Image (spheres, coloured by chain):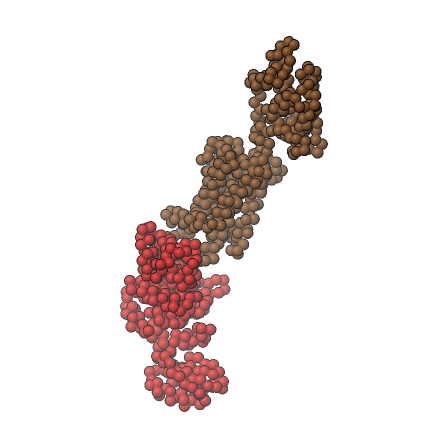
């Protein structure tokens, strides 16, 4: 799905619901988050993509007030978080990575509990719980205790519990971890629907496919630093276009920088003993590029042309595979 | 405040849903109250003890039988020789006792020590025996007077004399010090103090640790609820749990075990509410300072048992050595127990527990502040 058009449109939105500026946090000598800045606008899903330990959850914890930043500022709905944390929290709905629910309560009771604490009165919490159970396809199990639910159902309740008070800003911390593809697809579809009412979504994940298919804009984070951000198309542009070439063969002796004219026409994204991934510099005809690659002074067994993925972007930025 | 109350109400609602909780909250403590009360039962009312005396009655006649009744009326419990039990003194009524009395001859009963059982109880037996002998002689004089000169003394006359109300009675009371609580009067307050502390420490510690493990505390903290409200709500919920437990214990103590609760039930509830606050705050505190969540329950049980033992819940402090009495007064359990004994065992009023209540309040305040300061998400 190409969301670049939507992304550009969203960029025009005047006010950010979430504005993170130069956020830093260290744990002893470890700099968990360093100089991270981004914004999330109404109706937008912003994906924070990175491997485990990249600093996603730490960033999210600072945004929702669970951790105090060492430096930087978080503004929620135009107001500094630190000036009125309770007000900022009332605008947010936070879905943690773990299933942070009461197993001894039913799905409905869990929803009502979190709704009441988010500020709803009993009747309103009951109404909203019924709506969300319907939307999450859990109405028939509403009265069962959570401990009897499947992992996917618990994940759905976990998500619903953050939405009772109709938050403008929804923070989702890897909400699909550990569930089957079908349950994941259901949750992603539900998250897409959240922006229809104008909510802004910050979505952290280490699944490339989720970020690609769900997010209007994506920030790539690794070792606590935001390495790049933009729409999927913009990130692909970093590789020099919307296609990359994969050369396969015995490349142990290959010396791409030394090949005549190579550096002017191609950029190496990844190389190993048996594979070389390159992107063409400029918008040149792929057929011409292919001829140039086959003419290189190296024995190539196979050349594949493919659309670059976020993983390719991550590879280019970090030198390693996100799936590693 | 609304958030604090809501968190507390939801916590107790969840805790009381667990069937296992009922065993530890109610069934087990009530069993302990029964067994400890049974094991610590004393010889009757502590203000008017009924010591045991071993009786070897060889007299088949009515004078021996009336004398036995008199022994009972004077506060002695007689035991057969084959069931000596705790008797420290023995009494032998000779076979010709009735014959000699009816014949107007001097008659005597034998009084002897049981060598292996010599303690302060013996003096009490002798005193009761002396009163019984005096009463018996007065009945005999009265019966002989009714029979007139030359009339024979028979059982009817003797029992008539015995039935006449005494003109002068001895109303014996403790003076200068309070009687030691025994039986259920001892086990009820002791077990309330022990189990309220144990359950609030364990349930509080375990539930807070479990919520932290599952990420629920972090999720709660991400809501528009302050940390103070969160800690206050957790403690409030546990105090409610403690009060439910206290209510069940007091009702069972009164209705099942027949323990008189004194005339100041509001004072008892006030003391136990403040004590529950101390225990609840300590539970939240331990859940925060013990890093390994799986060790929270073990430590809480150990701490509660220590507080119970050193506070006087397992044995009366009246019989404990002086250092233990000092230690007990450094602990909330010791002060809570002292207040409960004042109110339940000695029937004192609110004024008698102002000091323990004040000290418990200081404990509660300190524990609450500690819990709030150390609270970990």
Rendered view: A92 above or below A291: above
Q: Position of residue B361 (x, y in %)?
A: 48, 40
In this rendering, the answer to whether B58 lies above or below A256 is above
Q: Chain B is which colour?
A: brown
Residue that appears at 42% across and 69% down: A206
What residue is drawn where x is 38% and y is 59%? Answer: A157
Residue B262 lies, with reference to residue A241, above or below; the image says above
Q: Give A195 or A183, whichever is nearer the viewer.
A: A183
Is residue B204 something that shows in the picture?
no
Residue nearer the viewer, A181 or A319: A181
- Residue B139: image location, x then y, percent: 61, 17
Q: Quadrant of residue B92?
A: top right
| Camera sees residue B57 | yes
| Image location (x, y in percent) of residue A96 | 41, 61
Q: Quadrant of residue A314?
A: bottom left
What residue is shown at x 43% (from left), y 54% (from top)?
A104
Q: Nearer the viewer, residue A258 or B255?
A: B255
Number of marks present in the image shown: 0
- Chain A shade in the render: red
Q: Quadrant of residue A87?
A: bottom left
């Amino acid at each position: 799905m190409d969301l670049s058009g939507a992304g550009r449109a969203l960029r025009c939105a005047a006010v950010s619901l979430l504005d993170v500026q130069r956020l830093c946090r260290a744990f002893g000598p470890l700099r968990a988050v360093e100089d991270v800045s981004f914004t999330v606008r109404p109706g937008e899903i912003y994906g924070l993509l990175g491997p485990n330990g990249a600093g996603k959850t730490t960033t999210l914890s600072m945004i929702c007030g669970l951790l105090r930043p060492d430096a930087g500022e978080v503004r929620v709905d135009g107001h500094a978080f630190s000036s009125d944390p309770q007000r900022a929290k009332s605008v947010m709905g936070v879905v943690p990575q773990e299933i942070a629910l009461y197993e001894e309560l039913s799905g409905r009771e869990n929803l009502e509990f979190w709704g009441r604490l988010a500020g709803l009165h009993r009747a309103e919490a009951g109404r909203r719980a019924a709506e969300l159970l319907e939307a999450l396809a859990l109405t028939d199990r509403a009265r069962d205790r959570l401990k009897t639910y499947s992992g996917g159902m618990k994940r759905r309740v976990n998500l619903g519990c953050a939405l009772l008070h109709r938050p403008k800003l929804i923070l989702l911390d890897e909400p699909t971890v550990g569930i089957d593809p079908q349950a994941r697809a259901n949750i992603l579809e539900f998250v897409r629907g959240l922006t229809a009412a104008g909510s802004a979504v910050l979505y952290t994940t280490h699944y490339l496919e989720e970020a690609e298919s769900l997010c209007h804009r994506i920030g790539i984070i690794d070792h606590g630093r935001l390495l790049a951000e933009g729409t999927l198309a913009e990130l692909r542009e970093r590789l020099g276009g919307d296609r990359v070439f994969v050369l396969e063969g015995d490349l142990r002796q290959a010396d791409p920088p030394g090949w005549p004219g190579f550096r002017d026409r191609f950029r190496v994204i990844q190389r190993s003993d048996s594979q070389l991934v390159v992107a063409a510099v400029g918008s040149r005809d792929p057929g011409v590029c292919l001829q140039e690659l086959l003419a290189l002074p190296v024995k190539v067994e196979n050349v594949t042309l493919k659309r670059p993925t976020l993983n390719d972007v991550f590879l280019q930025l970090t030198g390693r595979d996100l799936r590693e | 405040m609304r958030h604090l109350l809501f968190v507390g109400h939801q916590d107790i609602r969840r805790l009381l849903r667990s069937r296992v909780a009922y065993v530890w909250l109610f069934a087990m403590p009530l069993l302990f109250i029964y067994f400890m009360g049974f094991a610590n039962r004393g010889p009757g009312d502590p203000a008017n003890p009924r010591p045991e005396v071993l009786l070897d009655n060889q007299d088949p006649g009515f004078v021996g039988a009336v004398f036995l009744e008199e022994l009972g009326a004077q506060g002695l419990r007689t035991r057969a020789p084959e069931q000596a039990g705790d008797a420290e003194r023995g009494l032998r009524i000779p076979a010709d006792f009735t014959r000699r009395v009816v014949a107007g001859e001097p008659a005597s009963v034998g009084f002897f020590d049981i060598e292996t059982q010599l303690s302060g109880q013996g003096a009490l037996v002798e005193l009761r025996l002396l009163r019984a002998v005096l009463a018996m002689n007065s009945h005999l004089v009265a019966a002989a007077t009714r029979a007139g000169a030359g009339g024979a003394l028979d059982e009817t006359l003797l029992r008539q004399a015995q039935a006449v109300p005494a003109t002068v009675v001895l109303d014996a009371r403790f003076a200068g010090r309070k009687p030691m609580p025994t039986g259920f009067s001892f086990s009820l307050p002791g077990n309330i103090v022990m189990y309220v502390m144990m359950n609030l420490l364990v349930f509080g510690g375990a539930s807070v640790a479990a919520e932290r493990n599952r990420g629920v505390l972090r999720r709660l903290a991400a809501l528009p609820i302050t940390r103070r409200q969160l800690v206050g709500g957790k403690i409030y919920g546990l105090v409610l749990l403690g009060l439910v437990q206290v209510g069940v214990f007091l009702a069972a103590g009164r209705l099942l075990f027949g323990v008189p609760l004194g005339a100041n039930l509001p004072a008892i509830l006030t003391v136990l509410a403040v004590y529950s606050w101390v225990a609840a705050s300590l539970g939240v505190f331990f859940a925060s300072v013990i890093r390994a969540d799986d060790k929270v329950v073990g430590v809480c049980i150990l701490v509660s048992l220590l507080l119970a033992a050193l506070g006087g819940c397992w044995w009366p402090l009246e019989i404990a050595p002086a250092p233990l009495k000092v230690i007990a007064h450094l602990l909330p359990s010791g002060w809570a127990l002292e207040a409960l004994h004042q109110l339940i065992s000695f029937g004192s009023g609110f004024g008698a527990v102002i000091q323990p209540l004040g000290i418990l309040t200081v404990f509660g305040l300190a524990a609450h502040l500690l819990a709030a300061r150390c609270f970990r998400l």
